[in-house]
Image (tube, grey):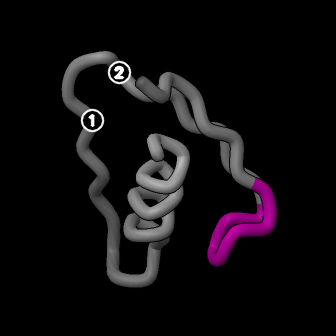
Amino acid sequence: MISKLSIKNLTVFPEANLEFSPQLNVMVGENGAGKRSISTMTGWLQR
């Protein structure tokens, strides 16, 4: 399980530090805000 994710220079994120809940996590944002980038990155990390 991923509990924290630090991102630097990825698509629209110059820098971001995210913490995830062990239960349910929901991403909400406008188009182009980077939601897919985060979901893709977490998918890569879980492999």
**Outermost residue toward the front in this view:** 47
The answer to whether 31 is drawn above or below residue 39 in the figure is: below
In this image, 30 relative to 47: left or right?
left
Mark 2: which amino acid? Answer: Ser
**In the image, residue 39 lies in the stretch drawn in magenta:** no
Task: Name the image quarter holding the N terminus.
Answer: top left
The answer to whether 5 is drawn above or below residue 7 in the figure is: above
**Tag 2–tag 1 contact (CB < 8 Å):** yes
Residue 26, picture quadrant? top left
Element marked by disc 1: loop
Residue 43 position within the rendered picture, expressed as x and y whole percent measured from the top left: 42, 53
Disc 2 residue crowd, few under 14, some 14–19, many 20+, Cα 10 Å = few
The boundaries of the magenta stretch are 8-14
Task: Characterize the magenta stretch by its predominant secondary structure.
Answer: strand
Residue nearer the viewer, 32 or 43: 43
Residue 45 position within the rendered picture, expressed as x and y whole percent measured from the top left: 54, 45
The answer to whether 20 is drawn above or below residue 37 in the figure is: above
In this image, 45 relative to 20: left or right?
right
**Outermost residue toward the top in this view:** 22
The image shows a total of numbered marks equal to 2
**In the image, residue 12 lies in the stretch drawn in magenta:** yes
Give the alpha-carbon distance from disc 2 to disc 1, as whole Å.
6 Å
Q: Residue at x 42, y 28 (%)?
A: 20
Residue 25 position within the rendered picture, expressed as x and y whole percent measured from the top left: 27, 35
Residue nearer the viewer, 30 or 13: 13
Please tell me the numbered disc located at residue 25.
1
Residue 15 position within the rendered picture, expressed as x and y whole percent measured from the top left: 76, 54
Which residue is label 2 attached to? 21
Q: Residue at x 47, y 46 (%)?
A: 47
Q: Residue at x 44, y 82 (%)?
A: 32
Residue 24, picture quadrant? top left
